[in-house]
């Protein structure tokens, strides 16, 4: 992060003498001088450190003066810093933004950067992090840039992607076979197109984006149609904080996150109306602020203060990063392409953060976070965890650090699987990583498991399979540095259980090493298997059938009214004859069922639409909850019965809030039972269902109120994007007991 040059400049400015050198896990500064200057140094060291650096602690020791003559940076001798050497990408800094107007060589230069900002992970091919190991290798430095690069007092000292109008990569705009290369003309052309309601595919830091005017309904609808993106909400980039606050609610911590150097998408509550086509009327917005110089320059020319800012990909494929592919696949969607002639080496989607219970929690961990390691309290060297199948992300272990890959995607998609293979090769090479143990999910059909088995054969190294929900709980234990036995509550959409059924409403007594399935939600058949994910009415029907049987008056159910009788009969046949109706205890399916039951979402048009709508319909919190039963399993028979009764009179917000409370209450009741029997007081909550803000906050409040210590994911997603970390941690503990 340019930390040593920063220390050097700081020491120089205070006329202090000494030495700074890099150690494996710290920077050591030997420094001599006037006491008052030294305390000044210490203060500035912490408060004016480069934005992307993170000072975890400062340890001070005094010793006899050596009598240094000057201040120097010691050359790196230890080869062990590879892990910390690659920084995530950093949003453009204010000095560079000022250079766009003031630095003669960088007036309107859209790829301006310095040691404090710019691309990092997305342009690196190998280590050491030098220009020749980045996609800047093809661009020689001009005299001015080279001078700055070599001057330790300059902000661009050893800034590998340093560039300017004379020597760096440049943008090109393509539309109807026309190519524009002058930046001023490019900006006007893009602005004209967006102002007129058109769309443009824009090359970003870690991949392409598709943009259009977010306030122009026709423009958004047309982009949605051409992208074949049913109803999944689009992210929105606002020109600045003021315009963002016109459309969204954001408190100080949310604003801090939005403006941080990581610059993620933050899910905010919507204030005033955006076109329904932007977010399908969900009441929340995935908001982001400009982070590349070009974004700022664009907003100077646009009439709108808000643009749709969505990944440039086809349906569920990884975001496109290569120009030829963008020309082939994105140009037909937008009709215009804005790109620059520097290769994106490592794909990285925008990261997504949601504040729950006052803390930022990652929903998708990619640009700005990867490949910064997650620090652990135990050794994970040589462990390679392949993750789950959806929202795949893998993880490699180096010493006490877990290095999570960027978001890979859904491996069922062939190009996502190819991306996985490519990213694995890159991580192994970059981090000099040689796998000694492989960890994977237990699901025999996950492509990540298949890949793990292949590596296990090829490399002849052990493979440890970790149960999906144990991995969820372990991810939370690992990032929170918990080494005890805990009550693990995993609420999830799906996951392969040790009894070969689908799990996901699980109460474990778990440690990193092992787990015991204490109890779980009732098993319910899923008629049609995976089909229930797109058609939550099937699960609603199944719940009613399971609890109330054939005789029930199904025509009284709101969410089944639009489903044909023949379809209902087929589903009933499937369940009663056990045809393609796997049993599932997943909490996600219960949320689906209730959402369908009360008529909110019988057929889903994007991932998790039913539970998202169920949460979104809550307009004010409630305290009440429905009856349920904790016996051998957790039964929601009475819950479903009451919901059916109450839904006759409407009041969806009330029903939904009470339902959420019921699930939270079930966690409390089971946890209390376990505490009474086993004296365990720590509860760990994980699994995709806990991305639900109302549910997680309510559950945490109830548990904390009863004296439990409660933990949830922050650093890695509670969804399957965090699974690899859990697998890594479990594998490490299993290895410990083998040696
Ligand atoms: Zn900068
Ligand atoms: Zn230059
Ligand atoms: Fe999961």
Image: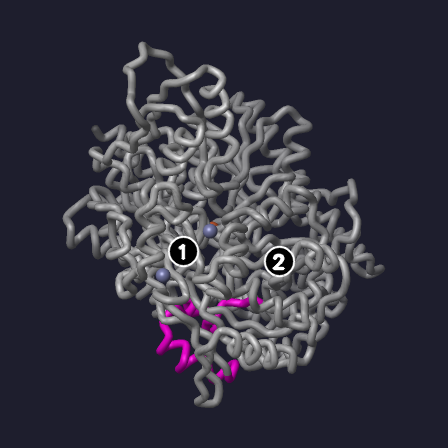
Residue 731 horizontal/vertical position (percent): 31, 38
Residue on which the image places disc 2: 287
User: Mark 1 against mark 2, which lies toward the viewer?
Assistant: 1
Q: Is residue 24 above or below residue 610?
A: above
* Residue at the image position 53 percent from the left and 43 percent from the top: 520
Residue on which the image places disc 1: 119
Q: Earlier in the sequence, mark 1 or mark 2?
A: 1
Q: Which quadrant: the N terminus? A: top left
Query: Quadrant of residue 397 in the image?
Result: top left
Horizontal relation, residue 438 to residue 661: left or right: left
Front residue of 667 and 216 = 216
Q: Secondary structure at mark 2?
A: strand
**Would you say the residues marked 1 and 2 are in contact, meaning their CB atoms lie under 8 Å apart?**
no
Q: Tell me if I can see residue 276 in this picture.
A: yes
Q: Is residue 607 above or below residue 563?
A: above
CA separation, marks 1 and 2? Answer: 21 Å
| Mark 1 surroundings within 10 Å by alpha-carbon count, few (fewer than 14), some (14 through 19), many (20 or more) | many
* Residue at the image position 36 percent from the left and 18 percent from the top: 32
Front residue of 281 and 305 = 305
Residue lying farthest to the right in this orientation: 649
Front residue of 360 and 644 = 360
Q: Tell me if I can see residue 425 in this picture.
A: no
Residue 532 lies in the magenta-colored region: no
Residue 196 horizontal/vertical position (percent): 65, 82
Q: Secondary structure at mark 1?
A: loop
* Residue at the image position 41 percent from the left and 43 percent from the top: 471
Horizontal relation, residue 502 to residue 235: left or right: left
Residue 192 horizontal/vertical position (percent): 61, 80
Magenta residues, as a range? 309-335
């Amino acid at each position: 992060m340019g930390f040593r040059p920063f220390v050097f400049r700081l020491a120089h400015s205070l006329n202090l003498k000494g030495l700074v050198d890099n150690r494996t896990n710290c920077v050591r500064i030997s420094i001599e001088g006037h006491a008052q200057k030294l305390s000044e140094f210490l203060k500035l060291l912490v408060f004016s450190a480069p934005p992307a650096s993170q000072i975890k602690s400062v340890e001070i020791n005094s010793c006899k003066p050596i009598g240094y003559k000057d201040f120097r940076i010691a050359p790196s001798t230890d080869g062990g810093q590879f892990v910390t050497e690659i920084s995530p990408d950093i949003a453009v800094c204010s000095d560079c933004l000022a250079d766009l107007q003031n630095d003669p060589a960088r007036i309107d230069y859209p790829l301006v950067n310095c040691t404090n900002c710019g691309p990092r992970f997305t342009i690196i091919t190998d280590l050491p992090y030098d220009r020749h190991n980045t996609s800047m290798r093809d661009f020689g430095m001009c005299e001015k840039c080279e001078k700055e690069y070599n001057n330790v007092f300059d902000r661009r000292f050893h800034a590998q992607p340093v560039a300017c109008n004379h020597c760096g990569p440049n943008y090109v705009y393509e539309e109807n076979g026309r190519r524009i290369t002058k930046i001023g003309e490019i900006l006007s052309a893009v602005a004209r197109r967006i102002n007129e309601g058109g769309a443009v595919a824009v090359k970003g830091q870690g991949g392409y984006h598709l943009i259009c005017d977010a306030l122009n309904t026709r423009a958004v609808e047309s982009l949605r149609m051409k992208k074949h993106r049913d109803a999944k909400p689009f992210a929105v980039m606002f020109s600045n904080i003021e315009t963002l606050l016109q459309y969204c609610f954001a408190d100080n911590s949310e604003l801090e996150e939005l403006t941080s150097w990581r610059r993620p998408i933050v899910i905010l509550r919507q204030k005033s109306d955006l076109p329904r086509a932007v977010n399908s009327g969900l009441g929340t917005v995935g908001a982001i602020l400009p982070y590349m110089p070009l974004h700022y320059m664009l907003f100077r020319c646009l009439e709108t203060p808000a643009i749709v800012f969505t990944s440039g990909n086809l349906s569920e494929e990884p975001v496109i990063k290569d120009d030829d592919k963008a020309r082939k696949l994105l140009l037909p969607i937008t009709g215009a392409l804005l790109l620059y002639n520097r290769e994106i080496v490592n794909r990285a989607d925008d990261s997504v953060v949601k504040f729950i219970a006052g803390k930022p929690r990652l929903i998708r961990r990619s640009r700005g976070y990867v490949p910064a390691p997650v620090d652990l309290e135990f050794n994970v060297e040589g462990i390679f965890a392949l993750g789950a199948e959806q929202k795949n992300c893998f993880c490699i272990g180096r010493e006490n650090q877990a290095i999570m890959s960027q978001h890979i995607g859904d491996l069922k998609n062939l190009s996502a699987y190819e991306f996985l293979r490519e990213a694995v090769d890159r991580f192994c090479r970059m981090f000099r990583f040689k796998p000694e143990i492989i960890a994977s999910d237990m699901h025999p059909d996950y492509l990540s498991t298949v890949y793990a088995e292949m590596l296990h054969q090829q490399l002849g190294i052990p493979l440890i399979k970790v149960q999906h929900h144990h991995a969820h709980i372990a991810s939370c234990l690992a990032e929170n540095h918990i080494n005890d036995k805990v009550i693990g509550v995993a609420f999830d959409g799906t996951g392969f259980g040790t009894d070969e059924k689908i799990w996901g409403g699980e109460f474990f007594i778990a440690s990193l090493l092992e787990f015991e399935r204490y109890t779980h939600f009732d098993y319910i058949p899923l008629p049609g298997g995976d089909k229930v994910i797109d058609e939550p009415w099937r699960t609603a029907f199944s719940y009613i059938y399971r609890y109330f049987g054939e005789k029930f008056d199904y025509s009284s159910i709101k969410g089944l009214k639009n489903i044909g009788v023949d379809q209902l009969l087929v589903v009933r046949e499937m369940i009663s004859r056990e045809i393609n109706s796997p049993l599932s205890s997943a909490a996600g399916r219960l949320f689906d069922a209730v959402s369908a039951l009360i008529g909110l979402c019988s057929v889903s048009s994007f991932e998790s639409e039913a539970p998202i709508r169920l949460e979104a319909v809550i307009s004010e919190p409630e305290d009440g909850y429905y009856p349920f039963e904790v016996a051998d399993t957790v039964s929601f028979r009475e819950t479903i019965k009451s919901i059916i009764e109450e839904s006759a009179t409407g009041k969806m917000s009330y029903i939904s809030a009470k339902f959420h409370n019921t699930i939270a209450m079930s966690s409390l009741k089971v946890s209390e039972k376990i505490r009474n029997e086993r004296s365990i007081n720590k509860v760990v909550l994980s699994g995709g269902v806990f991305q639900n803000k109302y549910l997680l906050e309510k559950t945490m409040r109830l548990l904390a109120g009863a004296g439990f210590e409660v933990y949830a994911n922050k650093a890695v997603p509670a969804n399957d994007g965090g699974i690899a970390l859990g697998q890594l941690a479990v594998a490490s503990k299993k290895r410990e007991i083998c040696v």
